[in-house]
Image (tube, rainbow, N blue to C red):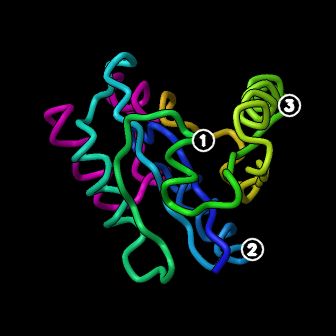
């Protein structure tokens, strides 16, 4: 069974994140979505909330496990039996950071591959920071996130 790890903060999970998991399932038997604790980033949602929201967003998608982690990504990938790490590329601006990360991960574990996936073009501009900014400013973010996430964001923003 070929397993890939899809790590990230996912604060909050977007339709673009979910799209990458579905695309990844076409390539791998199993995807482990690894939700990083990332307390240093000051996430809006707790790690437990982010795990629950991603699980809800992927309900009905077979071969996917959503878990939290707070260790080095390559160590967690090996612990979960992953042969690859999935990373999303939306635009050229993502490439520099993701390329450096991939090389560092390869240096730390030469047998673990990084697979870059591009989301559906309708999500190419989408990221969690933009969704939160839209919400903070009173805009409508519902078309960018799964329904459960939209509900959770409304509760956070008091809308």
User: Does the residue at mark 2 contact the one at mark 1 (Cβ under 8 Å)?
Assistant: no
The residue depicted at 31 percent of the width and 46 percent of the height is 50
Real-space Cα separation, disc 2 to disc 1, in angstroms? 20 Å
Q: Secondary structure at mark 2?
A: helix
Tag of residue 128: none
Label 1: which residue? Answer: 74
x then y, percent, for residue 64? 48, 72
Label 2: which residue? Answer: 27
The residue depicted at 23 percent of the width and 52 percent of the height is 151
The residue depicted at 23 percent of the width and 36 percent of the height is 46
Magenta-drawn stretch contains 122 = no
Real-space Cα separation, disc 2 to disc 3, in angstroms? 23 Å
Which is more foreground, mark 3 or mark 1?
1
Graded by Cα atoms within 10 Å as few (under 14), some (14 to 19) or many (20 or more), the crowding at tag 3 reads few
Q: Is residue 43 above or below residue 47?
A: above
| Sequence-earlier tag: 2 or 1 | 2
Q: Secondary structure at mark 3?
A: helix
x then y, percent, for residue 108? 70, 32
x then y, percent, for residue 113? 78, 51
- Quarter holding the C terminus? top left
The residue depicted at 42 percent of the width and 24 percent of the height is 133
Q: Is residue 20 above or below residue 152?
A: below
- Quarter holding the N terminus? bottom right
- Asked whether, in this view, residue 62 is left or right of residue 59, the answer is right
* Camera-side residue of 68 and 13: 68
- Asked whether, in this view, residue 16 is left or right of residue 148, the answer is right
Q: Which residues are magenta?
A: 131-159
Real-space Cα separation, disc 3 to disc 1, in angstroms? 24 Å
């Amino acid at each position: 069974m070929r397993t890939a790890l899809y790590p990230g903060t996912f604060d909050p999970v977007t339709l673009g994140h979910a799209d990458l998991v579905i695309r990844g399932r076409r390539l791998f038997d199993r995807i482990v979505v690894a939700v990083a604790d990332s307390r240093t980033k000051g996430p809006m949602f707790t790690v437990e909330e982010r795990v629950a929201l991603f699980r809800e967003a992927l309900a009905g998608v077979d071969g996917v496990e959503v878990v939290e982690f707070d260790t080095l990504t390559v160590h967690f990938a090996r612990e979960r039996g992953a042969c690859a790490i999935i990373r999303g590329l939306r635009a050229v601006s993502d490439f520099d950071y993701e390329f450096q990360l991939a090389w560092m991960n390869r240096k730390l574990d030469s047998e673990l591959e990084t697979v870059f996936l591009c989301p559906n073009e309708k999500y190419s501009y989408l990221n969690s920071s933009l969704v939160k900014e839209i919400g903070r400013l009173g805009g409508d973010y519902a078309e960018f996130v799964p329904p459960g996430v939209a509900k959770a964001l409304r509760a956070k923003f008091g809308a």
